[in-house]
Image (cartoon, rainbow, N blue to C red):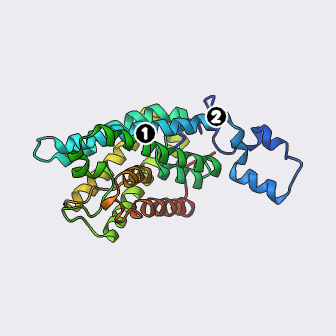
Amino acid sequence: MDLVATQGDNNHQPFSKSVENCDAINDFKGTKSPKTSFLVFIGAHEFFSREMWRAALVELVATACLLFTLTISIISCLESHVPEPKLLVPFAVFIIAFFFLLTTVPLSGGHMSPVFTFIAALKGVITLVRALLYVLAQCIGSIMAYMVIKNVMNNSAVEKYSLGGCMIDGNEGGIASGTALVLEFSCTFVVLFVGVTVAFDKRRFKELGLVMVCVILAATMGLAIFVSITVTGRGGYAGVGLNPARCLGPALLHGGPLWHGHWVFWVGPFLACIIYYCYTLTFGSVDED
């Protein structure tokens, strides 16, 4: 969410609004052709930025490590012998998300999900070119993570948990696509409304500090997971994805029921991003000066 990169008191160049600092764009300052304007608008100059490619590599590696750690931890929680193993999942999500956010926010913005990349692009925090490269890196990272998981996990666990993928109607029943879409939209909007609002507010960011902002973001994700897996109380539903890239990897490598309603895990979050963005335009947004 580019928490550090957008702050004015650090050495990083902002991921957006940096056109005039780019040599590639400076060459076109005297030109006002539609083509040049379009290239500036989408951030084509960032193709020549080594910082962007380094940040994209960070997103790839961080997403792969996050999803590997998160999936293995969640399956371990479900395999534990406590009375309500599902209640351990939100705590695992919170702890893991917090440490990964704390590590990657200063390096790439700490997206690790197309959802955060999309809302950052909508709000002008990053360029369209950077957003597309980030999403590609996140999807590749997801595939890499689940390739490792598939090779190290025994076959019975792979089949039992469908490689830890996003599922709405497994062998135990599940829920309808419409219900899953509502949950995906609602939980993603909560994460955006609470976590991203704080993350994009420079004044509150400075007041709270990086650690506290990461705590808020991670706690909001854990809360969304908790709500999704408890409100339905049905087997066969794996809870909200909150990360389309996380859902893509297992679907490609395992298939089967993971493709049933897979569109929900893309449409729901992106619809939430659009509604949240419209909300910030209509009712006022955070300070971006």
Q: Residues within 10 Å of mark 1 (few under 14, many from 20)?
A: many
Total residue callouts: 2
Quarter of the view holding residue 233: bottom left
- 13 is higher (above) or lower (below) than 276: above
- Residue type at numbered disc 1: Ala
Q: Which residue is outermost to the top?
A: 11
Q: In the image shown, does 73 or 223 lie closer to the viewer?
A: 73
Q: What amino acid is at disc 2? A: Glu
**Residue 141 in view, yes or no:** yes
- Residue 32 on image: x %, y %: 86, 55
Please give the name of the residue rendered at 50% of the width and 39% of the height, measured from the top-left corner. 60
Q: Which residue is mark 1?
A: 64
Residue occupied by mark 2:
51
Look at discs 2 and 1 and give the one toward the viewer: 1
Q: Is residue 123 left or right of residue 173?
A: right
Quadrant in which the C terminus appears: top right
